[in-house]
Amino acid sequence: MKLEVNLPHHGYILTIEDGLLQNIGRWVEQLWSKQQIVIITDTTVEKLYGQMVMTSIQNAGFKVKLIAVDPGEPSKSLANAEMLYEYLAHRGMTRKDGIIALGGGVVGDLAGFVASTYMRGLHFLQVPTTLLAQVDSSIGGKTAVNTASAKNLVGTFAQPDGVLIDPETLKTLEPRRVREGIAEIVKSAAIADENLWKLLDSFADEAELIEHAEEVITACCKIKRKVVEEDELDTGNRLILNFGHTIGHAVEQSRGYGVITHGEAVAIGMVQMNRVAESKGITPDGSTAALTEMLVKFHLPTGFEDFDPDKLYEALSHDKKTSGQQIRIILLEKIGQAKIVSMPIANMHEYLKIQRRK
């Protein structure tokens, strides 16, 4: 399956097919002339695919080096970005050379940020190996690193030259990482695709979803492509992709990056935001129950009893969707359709109230 992302200044193709990673060199040579390439990955992915990917690209006639960072959200830092700049400089990389991000969302964001800022921009390819990255973060050109104040606070918009998605890589993911991606899939269905929601509803569990991975990934990529094509720089309707993320990012940041996965935090954020909105009558009755049932089926968390609401509020006050004293939040019109609502950021105190279990 090939999906073309049509953008005014830099379109590219998403290629989705089982087994593509083994022949990645052929894909790269169709996109790039012969040049130096640095593969940025993490140590877990390096052990699984590093040598195979390097060999395939070398056999296609490229000069290739690989560098691996530690796995996990803490690696998405300015310190690691600086380390990578120095590595690229030492290798003699120029603007005619390229970077390949091989890994999950952390690697994709970090490598994309470095590629877009080193010498004001190198060639860049995304090769996502996690479900989360395949359905969301590898598509659309957002790159970023975290700071102590907020997740993804420092970043760029930089579209890749191509995205290669091989669902076969999901077979090596641990269950928690599969579920992390499923949270974003549930989000995508909830905001934009009732048919995808029905498909997810038909699955018994995570294993059955993975059996249909190519179909599910393609559906999510189509949603992301449409939104990105309409709003590349995230100033309008692209914000609907942040359903669950306003609270979710605050959950990640306040607990400590990597303690709770991004997908787990988004699952909590979706349910919490929707529960309060439903109690106010501004999102449909029963939608919170539907979200909760779907997430629980896939063994994702739906509440945050042990969090401090004041710390959450402090974290989300740095959210990029804030403007002055206003914040834009995403609510459901119905399952399969979302809306953007602006409100005073002070009102978020109410959305962070913890509902104790009876």
Image: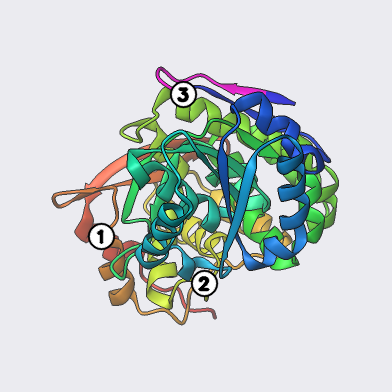
Q: 34 or 290, which lies in front? A: 34
In percent of width and height, residue 355 lies at 45, 73
Check contact, mark 1 vs mark 2: CB within 8 A.
no
* Residue under numbered circle 2: 258
- Position of the C terminus, as image quadrant, is bottom right
What is the three-letter code of the residue carrying label 2? Gly
First in sequence: mark 3 vs mark 2: 3
* Residue at image location 37% in from the left, 67% down from the top: 79
First in sequence: mark 1 vs mark 2: 2
Q: From this view, report whether residue 1 is shown above or below residue 41.
A: above
* Residue at image location 76% in from the left, 48% down from the top: 55
Predominant secondary structure in magenta?
loop
In percent of width and height, residue 109 lies at 47, 51
What is the three-letter code of the residue carrying label 3? Glu
Check contact, mark 3 vs mark 2: CB within 8 A.
no
- Check disc 2 and report its element: helix, strand or loop: loop
Distance, label 1 to label 3, CA atoms, is 27 Å
What is the three-letter code of the residue carrying label 1? His
Residue 225: tell me if it is visible. yes
Q: Magenta part of the protein: which range?
A: 3-10
* Residue under numbered circle 1: 318
- Numbered circle sitting on residue 229: 3
In percent of width and height, residue 283 lies at 44, 45
- Check disc 3 and report its element: helix, strand or loop: helix
